[in-house]
Image (tube, rainbow, N blue to C red):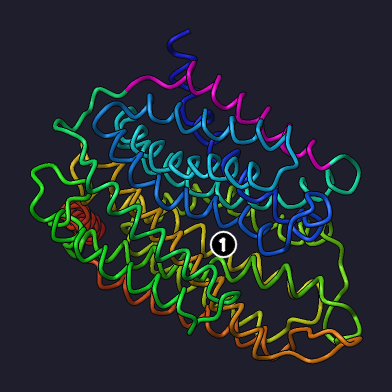
Amino acid sequence: MAALRERLTVPVLAFGAIVMAVTQTVVVPLLPDLPRLTGASAGAVSWMVTSTLLAGAVLTPVLGRAGDMYGKRRVLLIAFGLMTLGSLVCAVTSDIGILIAARALQGAAAAVVPLSISILRDELPPERTGSAVAMMSSTLGIGAALGLPLAALIVQYANWHVMFWATAALGALGLALASWAVRESPVREPGRFDTLGALGLAAGLVCLLLGVSQGGQWGWGSPRILGLFTACAVILTLWWVQQRRAERPLVDLKLATRPRVALPHVAALLTGFAFYSNTLVTAQLVQAPEATGYGLGLSIVATGLCLLPGGVTMLLLSPVSARISTARGPRVTLAIGAGVIAFGYVMRIADSRDLWAIILGATVVSIGTTFAYSALPTLIIRAVPAGQTASANGVNVLMRTIGQAVCSAAVAAVLVHHTSLIGGAPVPTLHGYLLAFAMAGTVALVACAAALAIPADPASRDTERARARTEVSRDEALEGA
């Protein structure tokens, strides 16, 4: 039985990551109908997405640090439990206030991935860690790709509460499997939890992400948005000073500012931006009415199916990305991934009218994302002590989240400024979509440059030297023969 549990550790953790991605995605098809179903305004309904984003951003580094200190399995089960509880609450209410609070509980699931990656580092032999981490990263793509059509089908053919009953069942299954198959890691980081640091980081992130996510609705120059950004700058500056002075800080800034850690964080932010534009823009583009001259007028279900090949490709190619990281190093894999993302957007710009070209371009972007996302946690693992793996990967996931939030705001700003009237309603023009693709592709190229600037770790240099010696020996043997 113990051997079976050990073999199932990776699949169980991967299943948990898929459930997390599905849970975060399923509400998207429901947003247009929620004002009618809940009796709330469209602005209030948008908080069902915003609250999950804010909670996930705040809790990911906090729960990661708690996992390093108090046990990764224990905190992982707490994250699963909060996610499942949030789904259950959403399934039994139509009150918008309770729904928003429950979606915030579901945001705790964002910590599942960094905690799982840390568990894999502690439990698996080094030769298996790379492929397992690559699979864990790719599950985010397949989960998001599955969530959209699944939710659309449920919304179309059943009561909307069924969607949350389904995610509650998946969450409960993930919780049960993780409690059975995952062992508690003996690797701990001693000391007291930095409560002040956690509160400071939470306050700063809420101000930042709230300003970014609501800027389009409230107005970027409005007093509320300017006040949020000012408060963010002040709070995070004070937090930085406090973290530098704390004996056991929430985030080890001395470690985080080293190039081998800081540059992967920068690349995560840029890659998150570049990746999210693919999903966000594709979904709007293919649903645009045919009267625009470029839109295909597809349903939500058909839209989700357009994104599905990219998610499946991410899962299938994760072993390939792991082999590249083993052979050439994860920074090379990250650079290749960012370059492929940029090439995918070149394809999107070249043809965004034909369905086959749209699906192909979106899939190429997903392939690049597979390589990039699989390399990022490996870079972090190689650069930080074992006792800080979960917290460091939590910060890396946080940077991806910030990148996605900034991307959402940037794409919205571009599309708002490039519209035309179709049937009396403003609709984004094809030029606006192409500008969004060009913006995301440029960001991907910057991510590629950041990846190439990451210093090679000693293990990679030793591997390269050993490979060179092997090649020289082989050549000498061939010459002697």
Residue 476 appears in the rendering: no
Was residue 55 drawn as part of the magenta stretch in this picture? no
Q: Nearer the viewer, residue 61 or 309?
A: 61
Q: How many marks?
A: 1
Q: Nearer the viewer, residue 62 or 336?
A: 62
Which residue is denoted by mark 1 in the rendering?
367
In the image shown, does 301 or 106 lie closer to the viewer? 106
- Left or right of 463 in this view: 93: right
Stretch of the chain drawn in magenta: 160-184
Q: Looking at the image, which residue is at 84% across and 47% down? A: 155
Dot 1 amino acid type: Ile
Please indicate, yes or no, whether residue 334 appears anywhere in the rendered image.
Answer: yes
Q: Is residue 383 left or right of residue 203?
A: left
Question: Between 426 and 402, which is closer to the camera in this rendering?
Answer: 426
Percent across and percent down for residue 139 are 55, 45
Dividing the picture into quadrants, the one containing residue 233 is bottom left
* Magenta run includes residue 181: yes
Q: Position of residue 271 (x, y in %)?
A: 45, 67
Q: Quadrant of the C terminus?
A: bottom left
Crowd around label 1: few <14 · some 14–19 · many ≥20 (10 Å): many
Query: Eyeballing the image, is 289 above or below 252?
Result: below
Point 24% across, 31% down: residue? 69
x 74%, y 84%: residue: 428
As drawn, which residue projects farthest toward the front? 223
Residue for point 79% across, 92% down: 420
Give the percent coordinates (x, y) of residue 184: 34, 21
Q: Position of residue 243 (x, y in %)?
A: 15, 53
Relative placement, left or right, of 259 versus 60 is: left
* Figure check: 401 above or below 318: below
**Left or right placement of residue 254 versus residue 306 in this view:** left
- Identify whether 241 is placed above or below 172: below
